[in-house]
Structures are given as structure tokens and as C-alpha cells.
Amino acid sequence: MKKISFYLMIVLVMFAFASCDKKSSDPGNFFSYAGKSYAVDSVALVEWVSNSGMSNEFSVFQFVFTNISGPDTTNLLVAVYDTLTNVLSGNYAGLDEVAAMDASRGIIPFGFIFASGIGMSNGNGFLTGHGGSIDVSVTNGDYNIKLNDISAGVYADMLDTNGDGNSGYTETGKIGGVYKGKITKYTQALSKKSATTNPLIDKLIKSSSIKIKN
């Protein structure tokens, strides 16, 4: 069930990016998982915005790095946020699902229509957890991104349904890599009504003093 849910998230995100991905021009760009490296063939970035233009605006920045090898496609998804600045810059630490609900900045394992982790060509998915980080700097549309041993694995209780503060996360590997080059950022409004139906995004919104009206 966990793998199926993550795979569906990948399908949703990639569908949204279908017309807005950019080919990677640098053969040195790659991501790795569990010791295996994948060249970045294309990259996409969307800023999902809630309460756009208002004082309580909230953004999640979703990266999708794609490797295409014949009929097989492997995707690296990284969603980051900073509830205090909404600016895409600096270091974002890897958080597990429980910690992400209360933190003001970091990598989000999963949410309404965003996710962080590895989507394999065989349909398996491994979400990010506690450990590692991503560094992002942007100058005139040129991105310099470094993936620093981000933990990836599986969750026994993805939404901590028993409320004990433990998601039962088990690491299966670490994510590394680099990306240098142009990325076109697209901005999309996040549905206010739909966003409030997800426990993670709802708690993130509340922790950042954002109030959503349906």
C-alpha cells in the first residue's frame, strides 16, 4: 500500500509537469540511490502556492529529476519549504513524516500533491526521512543543487494514525547527487479546499499561522 500510494503521487506530479520539463544540458548532472547513479535527463520545478498574494502565502517547491533509460524511467522527487520566508535558497534538512508536521523548514516526505523520494521504474517508491539535506542556490535562473546523503526508505505508519509520534520509518538507502544548470520555475495555485484534507499540509499550515478559508 505504501509503495502504491507513493507511485500514484509520482504520476500526479509528473502529469502536472508533462508540458514544463527542461532537458538537462550538463552530462555531469546525476542523482544516486543506494549506491546506484542515474544521469539527469530532464528536470522540472513547480512552486505550489497557497493563499497566493495574501499576507499568509505559503509555498512548497517541488523538484522532479528524471532519468530515462530505454523504456525505463526513474524519478527523484524533492519537495522543500520554509514557512517563514517562502524563499527557495540555502540548506534544507531531511525530515521524517512526524518531524515535518511541526518544523518550519526542510524536506517534506509527502503531502497533497508533492512528495520527496525515489520512484523506480518497477513501480517501487521510497520516501525521504530523517537525515541528510539538500543545498539550493539560484543566480539568474542558474541553479546549483547538491544532494547530501538524504535518507530514503519506507514508513510503517505514514500518517501516524495511532498518534504516538512514531511513523515506523525504516531507511533503505541514501540519496546523493548534483545538478548545475538552468531550470524554468512554474508557479501553480494549490487548491485551498483540497489542501486542508491532508493531515500533513494542514498541520504545516497551522504551524506557520496560515489560515485557509474554504
Image (spheres, rainbow, N blue to C red):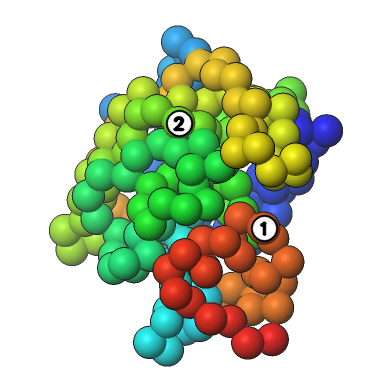
Left or right: 161, with 26 as reference point = right
Name the outermost residue toward the right.
1
Q: Secondary structure at mark 1?
A: helix
Q: Is residue 10 visible?
A: yes
Residue 20, position as x, y percentages in the image: 52, 61
- Give percent across and percent down for residue 27: 32, 29
**Contact, mark 1 vs mark 2 (Cβ under 8 Å):** no
Closer to us: 150 or 55? 55
The amino acid type found where label 2 is placed reads His
Q: Position of residue 177 (x, y in %)?
A: 34, 27
Residue beneath the point at 46% across and 25% down: 151
Residue 130 — which label?
A: 2
User: Which of the 4 quarters of the picture holds residue 178?
Assistant: top left
User: How many residues crowd mark 1 within 10 Å: few (<14), some (14–19), many (20+)?
Assistant: some
Residue in the foreground of this view, choosing between 96 and 65: 96
Q: Residue visible at 52% across and 68% down? A: 205
* Residue bearing the label numbered 1: 199
Out of 7 and 108, give the one closest to the viewer: 108
Q: Is residue 119 left or right of residue 35?
A: right
Q: Amino acid at mark 1?
A: Pro
Counting residues from the start of the chain, the first of labels 1 and 2 encountered is 2
Q: Quadrant of residue 148?
A: top left
Outermost residue, top side: 35
| SS assignment at label 2 | loop
Q: Which mark is residue 38?
A: none
Q: Position of residue 170 (x, y in %)?
A: 60, 20
- Determine whether 153 is above or below 188 in the image: above
Report the number of discs.
Answer: 2
Image quarter of the C terminus: bottom right
Query: Quick one: 120 or 25, which is closer to the camera?
Result: 120
